[in-house]
Amino acid sequence: MPVKHQIDNDLQLIITTVTGEAVDEELIAAMEKYQRDIRSKSDYNKYNEILDFSKLTSIGLTNGGIKAIAQIASATDQTDVKTKLALIVKSPLAFGLARMYQTYRSLNPRANKESRVFNRSHDAFEWLEHNHFI
């Protein structure tokens, strides 16, 4: 499951693209690495994020895996900085799992990131551009 990160400093945006098969262990490991290597840097605290899952070939995620990923992701949220997260998906299954992720993420009292799920990347970019908090 390849994961690629692109950081756009002009737009203050981190774009993560996940391809291949999404399974719990690999996605959890990728999220931990992302949190450690990118989100933990203060330069990126105010950056919005896009998680692009539109190129997945299959999904092998469980409820427990989604919950763990949400807990890891919300651990670096800054209570004094409000940012946005756009999740891009293609399939109904991916859409449902992304909504589950949103729910689990919102249950963490530290969570301070508005998130939405999109089927089209254009819509995700437009939402971030027209509703920029920073």
Image: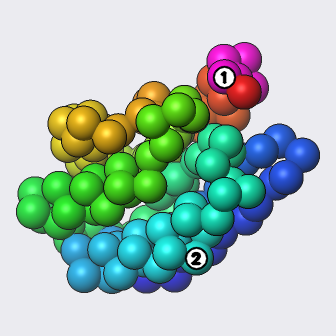
Q: How is the image coloured?
A: rainbow
Queried whether the magenta region covers residue 108, the answer comes back as: no
> Residue 97 placed where, x, y %?
24, 48
Between residues 60 and 115, which one lies in front from this camera angle? 115
Cβ atoms under marks 2 and 1 closer than 8 Å = no
Residue 81 appears left or right of 100 = right
The x and y percentages for residue 11 are 83, 42
Q: Which of the 4 image quadrants contains residue 103?
A: top left
Say which quadrant the N terminus sits in: bottom left
Identify residue type, mark 1.
Phe
Start-end of magenta stretch: 129-133
Q: Is residue 86 visible?
A: yes
**Which label was assigned to residue 37?**
2
The residues tagged by marks 2 and 1 sit, at their Cα atoms, a distance apart of: 24 Å
Q: Residue furthest right?
A: 10
Looking at the image, which residue is at 52% across and 39% down? 86
- The extreme front residue here reads 80
Residue 82 x, y percent position in the rendering: 54, 30
Front-most of residues 31 and 127: 31
Which residue is rendered at x = 20% and y = 63% of the image? 68
Q: Residue furthest top?
A: 130
Residue at 72% from the left image edge and 27% from the top image edge? 134
Disc 2 element:
helix
Task: Please tell me which of labels 2 and 1 falls first in the chain.
Answer: 2
10 Å crowding of disc 1: few (<14), some (14-19), many (20+): few
- Type of amino acid at the residue the image marks with label 2: Asp
Residue at x 40%, y 75% (from the top left corner): 32
Residue 43 vs residue 56, the one in the foreground: 43
- The label on residue 133 is 1
Rendered image: mark on residue 116: none
Instruction: Residue 25: name its quadrant.
Output: bottom left
